[in-house]
Image (spheres, rainbow, N blue to C red):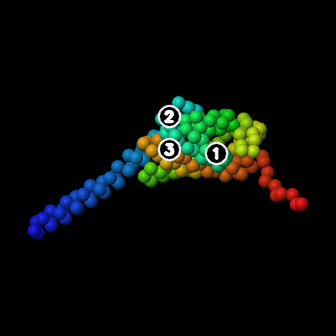
Amino acid sequence: MKKTVLLVCLAVAVCSALAGQQAVEKPMCEKKVQVLLDKVLELWNKPDLALIPELYAADCIAQTSTMPEPYVGFEGIKAWVENTRAMMPDLKMTFEEAVVQGEKVATAWTMTGTHTGPMPTPMGVVPPTGKKVRITGLAIDTMKDGKFQKEVVVFNVLEMMMQMGFQLLPPKGE
């Protein structure tokens, strides 16, 4: 009986030790995400639109601070990249930090460029200002089968507009 209890305890200890080794595999997951993020930079910086199906799920949804409606599917992501690149053809994006937890990836990013093209907004198109902008933001992505399934991108749109020369004025009194 004592041998059986000892063997069970030993088996539990071995299983626990092996379960702890799974944490060692986590950097491999982070390495895979880093490869994906490097490709995201290629998508935005070159731009290499052919990478979209490799990076995003066919039914992906991307919600941004600038548009009330999400970008949906491959065509939505393509339109997002094309519109942004048309607005700032010299766009340069970098990732400052990435955090991976399970199927979630959070990134802190910076985007720089010159506003030399039209900028579509819910209120209409903002004409080019020729101003250089530097935008920082955060993205939270949900991964599915190694691809981006859902993306939420937030940044300070007011700060970007002020860098373009717009002013925030208080409403006129009645």
The residue wearing badge 1 is: 69
Q: Which residue is drawn at 75% across and 49% down?
A: 162
Quarter of the picture containing the C terminus is bottom right
* Quarter of the figure with residue 111: top right
Query: Quick one: SS at disc 2?
Result: helix
| Earlier sequence position, callout 1 versus callout 2 | 2
For discs 1 and 3, the disc positioned in front in the rendered view: 1
Residue reaching furthest bottom?
Answer: 2
Of residues 122 and 138, the one nearer the viewer is 122
- Horizontal placement of 57 versus 155: left or right? left
Q: Mark 3 points at which residue?
A: 149
**Residue 83 percent coordinates (x, y):** 66, 36
Disc 2 target residue: 53
Which comes before the other along the chain, label 1 or label 3? Answer: 1
Q: Name the residue type under label 1.
A: Glu
Tell me which corner region of the image, top left, top right, bottom left or bottom right, holds residue 90.
top right
> Dot 1: few (<14), some (14–19), or many (≥20) neighbours within 10 Å?
few
The Cα–Cα distance between marks 1 and 3, rounded to whole angstroms, is 16 Å
Residue at mark 2 to residue at mark 3: CA–CA distance: 11 Å
Position of 156 compared to 169: left or right?
Answer: left
Q: What residue type is labelled 3?
A: Gln
